[in-house]
Image: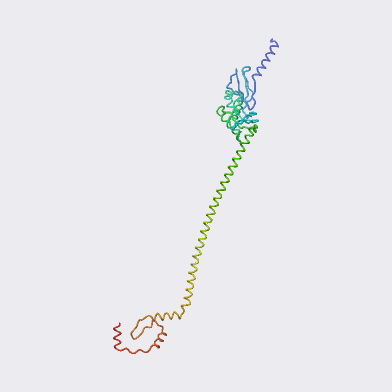
Amino acid sequence: MIPLGVVAGFAVVLAIALNGAVHHIEEGYVGVYYRGGALLSKVSSPGYHIMTPFITSFRSVQVTLQTDEAKNVPCGTSGGVMIYFDRIEVVNVLSASSVYGIVKNYTTEYDRTLIFNKYFYIARTSNSCETDQIDENLKRALQEDLTVMAPGLLVQAVRVTKPKIPEVATHHQKVVEKEAETERKRAVIEAEKLAQVASIQQAQIVHEKETQVTISRLDDEAHLARQRAHADAQLYNAQREAEANRLLLTPEYLELKRIDAIGSNNKIYYGNEIPNIFLPSDLTAVAAAAAPAAPAAGPADATKAKKRR
């Protein structure tokens, strides 16, 4: 029969072995294993698992969003002034498929090597703290390095508190801001002066154009007035001439002109009958009554008339 002490001792050893062999991984983590100090390629998912006790150990690695925080982080400026941020937070996430490679190269404390030390170096050596987008600049610089050094580790966001500026740096910053403000005012004054000069020149050009338009309009109006006066004079002359003709060309005057025209016709007609186409019958009768009776033509007269023909 086995002594009770041996059974009790065996039970204790078995309990200790089971306690070291059975372990669990929390949700949001994966497990990596070491045997004799060497990293095994096995990566376990959340839940209960069994490992060889005493010679195998495990570590949990977070694969969900985590925030790494650093305090009193220095940041250099181009002027050589060092300012300090009370706190910088880096939100990052590690892909489960990249856990083995990153832990193998940087251990389970990879965030200290790849994030803490890295953004201390970036903040201290770059001029990113001089801009209004410090967080975006740090995030971009971190991610560019992580893409090369640790694929699978992604930076989601960087949060930066308001920096603390030393007194000397504050005075220097005020001087720089004052100089920038003075330069800005000088540029504004220069721009306003140029704008005023351009406005005056434009006003002069507009005034000249308006003067030319006015002169051209006055010339056109004067020319139109002269043409209208000339046309009015011609119309007046025509009207006066028509009025004079109307007053002059009376029936009596026209009749006189007709008689003068007939009288100026020196044609002499011979024969038994004298044509009366140029005289109305009443004028022919008056002329016949007023004229003395002509003597009968003798043979000699007839001979002369024939000769004249």
Quadrant containing the N terminus is top right
Q: On screen, 139 above or below 235?
A: above
Q: Is residue 284 left or right of residue 38?
A: left
Please state which of residues 89 and 38 is positioned toward the viewer in this rendering.
89
Q: Indicate the position of residue 79 as horizontal and vertical percent values.
A: 59, 32
The answer to which quarter of the image holds residue 141 is top right
Q: Indicate the position of residue 230 as horizontal and vertical percent values.
A: 48, 67
View extreme (top): residue: 1
Q: Is residue 95 left or right of residue 294?
A: right
The answer to which quarter of the image holds residue 31 is top right
Quadrant containing the C terminus is bottom left
Q: Indicate the position of residue 164 as horizontal and vertical percent values.
A: 65, 32
Numbered label tally: 0
Please state which of residues 10 and 272 is positioned toward the viewer in this rendering.
272
Q: Indicate the position of residue 63 as horizontal and vertical percent values.
A: 61, 27
Colouring: rainbow
